[in-house]
């Protein structure tokens, strides 16, 4: 049930966009997902195998700030950031074997095709057979970048047909004109943490660069990048007045000035939203999660979050390299997805978009941890079963020897 809630909820969040009783449907989805994950995790906490102690300091820091330095909507934002961790914790309590993982990956491939088709239909591409200048596919592009990591790892580990699904997921951000997601999805194969021969990795990197440069020069992407409609790679700079930042540069500059007033510990939970709303009226999100964290939690909190991401990625990669089969693929795709996550954080609010990226990402990692735990327990059980007869016969032989040497009468 948990996996279905995550998969169906993630897809529905990307393709369903309407309000119910004054709230967006995706709001209900993350609440339901978080609630189900919390119930599962609490009921089976003794079986949890995710490295929750890695995340505990960051979660405790957020909850502390929510209590002592709380701004409007702070609790909602805090729970949104905790939700993926709870999903991963809950997934790590499940009973998992290789067959279940293969079924989950099959559903992910179906998810990818459905996401691609429904996204193009929602943007009108399937009906007009043309690419609009505005698509509204930013959420779908984030999910595509996550799934691209899954298919990149699958391909690296020997599943050739995974390359076709990877191409679909890389194409979606280009169709959607989501700039950072384009890069984050395109580099998933060259930068995958799964083992890939150096020559093949270099070849894919070269292809990504060539195709990326060719796409960059198209009128559609040029118009998205520059107000004048044309520019070079060297013109991509916040200092270039022609570079299309849609007002983010000014907001970031104002936030940096305010960060200097409280650099180490920040202003408080969700303070940046209150600050931007007071400053601009309508703009409430900075579209830069690193800046958001600095504003709210200071250098200390931001450093802790970065260290947590790095520690979790390294642990997942280490376990993946020691694993085999489907478990190896899940660990390595989960570790690789942190690269995409960090990149998208630079220009978007992915840390709050649990339904688009975080929930499915941590579900993948949780499944890997659960499968690794069950495999280890199975091995230990087999060793105990193997040891028991040997111990029995050894004790019996010892008793026979003692009986033979015992005096009669």
Image: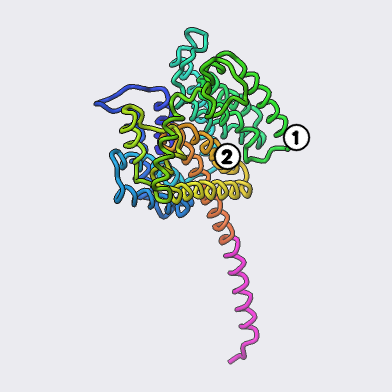
Picture residue at 60% right of the left edge, 78% below the top? 399
Q: Can residue 371 be seen by looking at this rendering?
A: no
State left or right for residue 379 relative to residue 65. Answer: right
- Side of 135 where 24 appears, left or right: left
Q: Which residues are magenta?
A: 386-409
Q: Is residue 349 left or right of residue 372?
A: left
Q: Of callouts 1 and 2, which one flags the residue occurring earlier in the amino acid sequence?
A: 1
Q: Is residue 363 above or below residue 287?
A: below
Examine the rendered structure and indicate whether residue 269 appears above or below residue 187: below
Image coordinates for residue 80, horizontal then vertical, percent: 37, 39
For label 1, the crowd category at 10 Å Cα-Cα, with few meaning under 14, some 14 to 19 and many 20 or more, is few
Residue 251 in magenta? no
- Looking at this view, is 187 or 17 the one in front? 187
Look at mark 1 in the image and give the residue it sits on. 199
Q: For the C terminus, which image quadrant? A: bottom right
In the rendered image, residue 143, in percent from the top left (x then y), is placed at 49, 30
The quarter holding residue 186 reads top right
Q: Nearer the viewer, residue 126 or 349?
A: 349
Q: Position of residue 228 (x, y in %)?
A: 53, 15
Majority secondary structure of the magenta segment? helix
Q: Where does label 2 land, which residue?
A: 336
| Element at label 1 | helix
């Amino acid at each position: 049930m948990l996996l279905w809630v995550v998969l169906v909820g993630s897809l529905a969040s990307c393709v369903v966009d309407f309000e119910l009783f004054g709230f967006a449907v995706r709001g209900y989805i993350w609440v339901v997902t978080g609630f189900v994950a919390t119930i599962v995790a609490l009921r089976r906490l003794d079986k949890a195998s995710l490295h929750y102690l890695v995340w505990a300091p960051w979660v405790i820091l957020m909850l502390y700030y929510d209590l002592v330095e709380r701004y409007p909507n702070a609790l909602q934002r805090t729970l949104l950031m905790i939700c993926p961790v709870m999903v991963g914790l809950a997934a790590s309590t499940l009973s998992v074997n290789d067959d279940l993982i293969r079924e989950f990956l099959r559903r992910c491939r179906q998810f990818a095709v459905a996401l691609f088709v429904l996204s193009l239909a929602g943007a009108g591409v399937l009906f007009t057979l043309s690419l609009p200048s505005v698509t509204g596919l930013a959420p779908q592009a984030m999910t595509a970048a996550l799934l691209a990591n899954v298919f990149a790892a699958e391909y690296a580990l020997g599943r050739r047909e995974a390359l076709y699904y990877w191409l679909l997921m890389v194409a979606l951000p280009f169709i959607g004109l989501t700039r950072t997601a384009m890069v984050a999805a395109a580099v998933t194969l060259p930068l995958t943490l799964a083992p890939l021969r150096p020559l093949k990795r270099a070849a894919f990197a070269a292809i990504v660069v060539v195709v990326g440069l060719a796409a960059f020069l198209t009128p559609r992407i040029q118009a998205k990048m520059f107000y004048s409609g044309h520019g070079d790679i060297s013109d991509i700079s916040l200092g270039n007045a022609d570079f299309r930042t849609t007002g983010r540069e000014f907001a970031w500059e104002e936030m940096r000035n305010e960060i200097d007033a409280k650099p180490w510990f920040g202003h408080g939970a969700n303070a940046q939203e209150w600050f931007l709303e007071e400053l601009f009226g309508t703009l409430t999100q900075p579209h830069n999660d690193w800046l958001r964290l600095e504003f709210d939690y200071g250098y200390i909190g931001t450093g802790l979050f970065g260290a947590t991401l790095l520690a979790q990625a390294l642990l997942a990669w280490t376990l993946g390299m020691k694993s085999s089969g489907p478990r190896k693929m899940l660990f390595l795709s989960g570790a690789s997805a942190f690269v995409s996550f960090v990149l998208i954080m630079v220009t978007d609010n992915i840390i709050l978009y649990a339904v688009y990226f975080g929930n499915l990402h941590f579900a993948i990692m949780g499944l890997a941890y659960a499968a690794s735990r069950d495999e280890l327990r199975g091995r230990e059980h087999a060793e105990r079963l193997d040891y028991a007869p040997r111990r029995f016969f050894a004790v019996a032989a010892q008793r026979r020897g003692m009986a033979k040497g015992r005096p009669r009468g």
